[in-house]
């Protein structure tokens, strides 16, 4: 596609439920990142995929968070047993090794 | 580890005022430096970048110079407009195949007429 897309754009869930967030990177981009942006806060790195290499999961805040990238393209970020502190905007970005990151519009998650 | 430190906001300026947003960094290698901007209700987008010492990145009237001696990449604009109101993020990435990007916390700029 022309840009990075994310779905859903908004998600409201109840505490304790699992959620899945999807990212479609720009076609051909080899690297994909997930970030979290809480209200009034900066960007918190979550996970990074680069080609066929093992992902860098060093930013995942707990074992309730996981992500996968299928076929080197689409990525899904899963949050299990959601907590209210998980409420944030989840951003995805991709890059073709040119260092510039192209961001999606984000998924706004609200955990009630 | 690598880190980016930005001046805290929010920064409130009158239209046509001069803008400086400070950014300093620490890096284990030789980084490329970036400024990203997030306009209200929109996603982050690259504003400008510089890949080596003394390079000046520029775009939309904004400039930033890569200063290796002071490990800084301050963002400047001579005359801000209301449309420049946004959150600005300084970021770095190391050269080479592994391009994990480290972001600063962001600085919110509000320009009033």
Image (cartoon, coloured by chain):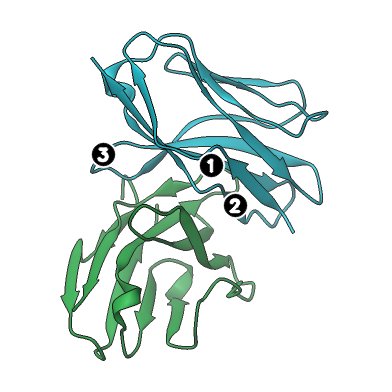
Query: What is the CA distance from the residue labelled 1 to the residue labelled 2?
Result: 9 Å
For mark 2, what is the residue?
B101
State the residue in front, A94 or B85: B85
Q: Colour of chain A?
A: green
Q: Is residue B7 above or below residue B19?
A: below
- Which structural element holds mark 2? strand
For disc 1, the neighbor class at 10 Å (few under 14, some 14 to 19, many from 20) is many
Q: Are marks 2 and 3 in contact (CB under 8 Å)?
A: no
Q: Are marks 1 and 2 in contact (CB under 8 Å)?
A: no
- Which structural element holds mark 3? loop
Question: Mark 3 falls within which chain?
Answer: B
For disc 2, the neighbor class at 10 Å (few under 14, some 14 to 19, many from 20) is many
For mark 1, what is the residue?
A100
Q: Residue at x 29, y 56 (%)?
A: A5
State the residue in front, B11 or B83: B11
Residue A22 appears at what percent x and percent y? 31, 69
Question: Mark 1 falls within which chain?
Answer: A
For mark 3, what is the residue?
B40
Query: Where, quadrant-wise, is the N terminus of chain B in this rendering?
Result: bottom right
State the residue in front, A36 or A92: A36
Lower sequence index among marks 2 and 3: 3
**A59 to the left or right of B59:** right
Residue B74 appears at what percent x and percent y? 61, 27
Q: Residue at x 31, y 36 (%)?
A: B39
Query: What is the CA distance from the residue labelled 1 to the residue labelled 3?
Result: 21 Å
Question: Mark 2 falls within which chain?
Answer: B
């Amino acid at each position: 596609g022309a840009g990075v897309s994310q779905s859903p754009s908004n998600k409201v869930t109840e505490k304790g439920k699992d959620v899945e967030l999807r990212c479609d990177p720009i076609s051909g981009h080899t690297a994909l990142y997930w970030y979290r942006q809480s209200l009034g806060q900066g960007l918190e790195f979550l996970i990074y995929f680069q080609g066929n290499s093992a992902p860098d999961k060093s930013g995942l805040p707990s074992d309730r968070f996981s992500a996968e990238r299928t076929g080197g393209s689409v990525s899904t970020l899963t949050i299990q047993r959601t907590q209210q502190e998980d409420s944030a905007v989840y951003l995805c970005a991709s890059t073709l090794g040119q260092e510039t990151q192209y961001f999606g519009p984000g998924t706004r998650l609200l955990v009630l | 580890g690598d880190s980016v430190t930005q001046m805290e906001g929010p920064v409130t300026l009158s239209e046509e005022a001069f803008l400086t947003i400070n950014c300093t960094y620490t890096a284990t290698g030789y980084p490329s430096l970036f400024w990203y901007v997030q306009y209200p209700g929109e996603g982050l987008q690259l504003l400008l970048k510089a890949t080596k010492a003394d390079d000046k990145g520029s775009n939309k009237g904004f400039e930033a110079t890569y200063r290796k001696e002071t490990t800084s990449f301050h963002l400047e604009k001579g005359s801000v407009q209301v449309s420049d109101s946004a959150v600005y993020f300084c970021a770095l990435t190391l050269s080479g195949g592994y391009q994990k990007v480290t972001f600063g916390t962001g600085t919110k700029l509000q320009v009033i007429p």
